[in-house]
Image (cartoon, rainbow, N blue to C red):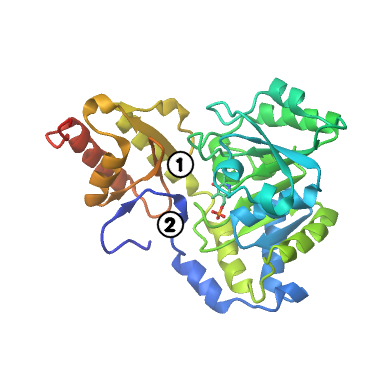
């Protein structure tokens, strides 16, 4: 395992993972060609294996998860159309509004519940096609749900939304950046989770540890069109096999170990729940993302706690008043214990800042 020499416990995101020794070897030895011309055998192999893992006909390798969402949704929609998304979705909160701005697509935003779902009835009422509204073309869901503490959407819910989408003639898209975290948490195949969706994209560069890349998966005809969208967005890559090689190792070797990240997140969540002044519902933590807040009555506020922890080598991310810790390859149980004792010492101990 590649450990940081400086002893940092970096819980900002699972994107901070570095390629494993096996990935670096595979990258060095990858057979490559010009993928825009269709010549890269390693990219082709990755696209096939990835599509098969989520039960789709074909896949398309893209540089990032943001581009994967753009390629998926711009290919499914046209002007004067809309995509229904949750107000806590990555698509709506963290992608610079690109789908609206670059795609000319209207984002019809509905509130997410804390479990990452959008109530079925809300979706049913939102689908529209009147002459004075944009036409609803796609419902986009996120699983696991990043900003909802890594929530796993229940399979029954996905099937209900799938039935609604079919009944109303709209496409269903999954931002499955962490679909394997959902699969591991439920103990089922990613293909089962992906089944109700026409189009699914997922990341290799989060908990799976690859340095770069995501994949868009769907029918063969869809992927043929998606290839043009990727080209338009500047995402056609040449000897991309060096990247695809690492992603193949990620798929083959790094999925099962996500269970360890989930155990570590649970340990962290339960430890945090035992610290007076930390607000968290540990029951919400099903995968590798832990979101919590600090009660201002402790004398702390989130930014100062984040900074104080940083000085002790524990890195968290901050969004508004919410602190976020993400477990991943490279974070051990021992790291979690160290992080917990640092947080406990600050919040419960003599270090609490004087109120001003
Ligand atoms: C990280 C993430 C993305 C985007 O991935 P990038 O690699 O940052 O482009 C998309 N959706 C979700 C839910 C994510 O967590």
Toward the left, the furthest residue is 350
In the foreground, 139 or 18: 139
Mark 2 to mark 1: distance in Å?
Answer: 14 Å
The residue identified by callout 2 is 16
Looking at the image, is mark 2 or mark 1 nearer the viewer? 2
**Viewer-side residue, 254 vs 16:** 16
Measuring from the top left, give residue 27's x and y in whole percent: 54, 73
Which residue occupies 69% across, 44% down?
191
The crowding category of the residue bearing disc 2, from other C-alpha atoms within 10 Å (few below 14, some 14 to 19, many at least 20), is: some
- Residue 292 location, x and y as percent? 38, 33
Q: Residue furthest top?
A: 121
Left-right relation of 88 to 71: left
Residue in view at x 27 percent, y 40 percent = 305
User: Quick check: 300 left or right of 233?
Assistant: left
Q: Which residue is mark 1?
A: 288
Residue visible at 41% across and 35% down in the picture:
291
Crowd rating for badge 1 (residues with CA inside 10 Å; few <14, some 14–19, many 20+): many
């Amino acid at each position: 395992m590649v450990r940081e020499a400086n002893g940092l416990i970096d819980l900002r995101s699972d994107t901070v993972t570095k390629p494993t020794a096996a990935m670096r070897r595979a990258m060095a030895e990858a057979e490559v060609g010009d993928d825009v011309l269709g010549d890269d055998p390693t990219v082709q192999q990755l696209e096939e294996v990835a599509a098969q893992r989520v039960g789709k006909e074909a896949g398309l390798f893209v540089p990032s998860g943001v581009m994967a969402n753009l390629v998926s949704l711009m290919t499914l929609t046209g002007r004067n159309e809309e995509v229904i998304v949750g107000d806590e979705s990555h698509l709506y909160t963290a992608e610079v509004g690109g789908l609206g701005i670059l795609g000319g697509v209207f984002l019809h935003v509905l509130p997410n519940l804390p479990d990452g779902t959008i109530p079925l009835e809300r979706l049913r009422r939102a689908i529209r096609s009147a002459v004075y509204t944009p036409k609803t073309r796609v419902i986009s869901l996120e699983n696991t749900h990043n900003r909802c503490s890594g929530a796993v959407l229940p399979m029954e819910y996905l099937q209900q939304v799938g039935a609604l989408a079919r009944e109303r003639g709209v496409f269903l898209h999954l931002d499955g950046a962490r679909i394997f975290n959902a699969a591991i948490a439920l103990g089922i195949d990613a293909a089962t989770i992906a089944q109700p969706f026409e189009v699914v994209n997922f990341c290799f560069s989060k908990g799976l540890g690859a340095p770069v890349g995501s994949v868009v998966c769907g029918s063969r005809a869809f992927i043929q069109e998606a290839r043009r969208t990727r080209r338009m967005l500047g995402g056609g890559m040449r000897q991309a096999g060096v990247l695809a090689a690492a992603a193949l190792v990620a798929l083959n070797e790094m999925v099962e170990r996500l269970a360890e990240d989930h155990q570590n997140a649970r340990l962290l969540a339960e430890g945090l729940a035992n610290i007076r002044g930390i607000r968290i519902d540990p029951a919400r933590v099903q995968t590798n993302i832990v979101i919590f807040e600090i009660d201002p009555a402790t004398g702390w506020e989130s930014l100062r706690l984040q900074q104080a922890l940083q000085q002790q080598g524990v890195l968290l991310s901050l969004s508004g008043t919410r602190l976020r810790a993400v477990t991943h390859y490279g974070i051990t149980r021992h790291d979690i214990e160290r992080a917990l004792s640092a947080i406990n010492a600050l919040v419960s101990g003599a270090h609490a800042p004087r109120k001003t």
